[in-house]
Image (spheres, rainbow, N blue to C red):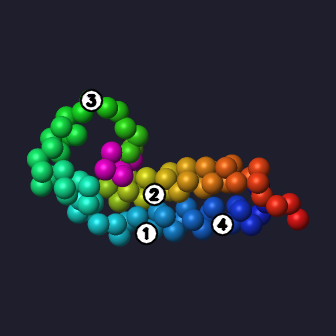
Amino acid sequence: MNRRYKILLLVSILSASVVSLFASSSPDGLEKVAEDKGFIVKALNYPSKVLMPDYELNIFGNDYLAVAFAGMIGTIIVFAFVYFALRPIAIKK
């Protein structure tokens, strides 16, 4: 990975960690419909283990850090996926 991609990744991670703090705590569209139609209870009672429930990774005990860290992890996952998916078809200069 060259220097340009490393800088882009760093800027993306910092941006995601800051911008995620301003995300709305209101439910998104699909969650709102599930609440209105009454089947949100089924989703809440589903016995699954997820990495970041409600877009938080609460390993620090602080709500702000939990959201910021989840934004950072999500950015790294998306960046890695795009980087490795497009790497084989990238035009070499």
Which image quarter holds the C terminus?
bottom right
Query: Who comes first in sequence, dot 2 or dot 4?
Result: 4
Task: Give the spatial CA distance, label 3 vs label 1.
Answer: 31 Å
Q: Label 4 neighbourhood size at 10 Å, few (<14), some (14-19), many (20+)? A: few
| Residue depicted at x 11% and y 47% | 38
Q: Position of residue 78 (x, y in %)?
A: 55, 53
Q: Which residue is mark 3?
A: 47
| Residue depicted at x 55% and y 50% | 77
Q: Which residue is mark 1?
A: 19
Query: Who comes first in sequence, dot 4 or dot 1?
Result: 4
In the drawing, what numbered circle is on residue 66? none
Element at badge 1? helix
Query: Who comes first in sequence, dot 1 or dot 2?
Result: 1
Q: Which residue is mark 2?
A: 71
Looking at the picture, which amino acid does disc 4 mark?
Leu
Task: Give the spatial CA distance, label 3 vs label 2.
Answer: 24 Å
- Dots 1, 2 in contact, CB < 8 A: yes
- Dots 3, 2 in contact, CB < 8 A: no
| Residue depicted at x 23% and y 54% | 31
**Residue 3 versus residue 48: which sits nearer the camera?**
48
Q: Which residue is mark 4?
A: 8
Q: Which circle, 3 or 4, is nearer the viewer?
A: 3
Q: Label 1 neighbourhood size at 10 Å, few (<14), some (14-19), many (20+)? A: few
Query: Who comes first in sequence, dot 3 or dot 2?
Result: 3
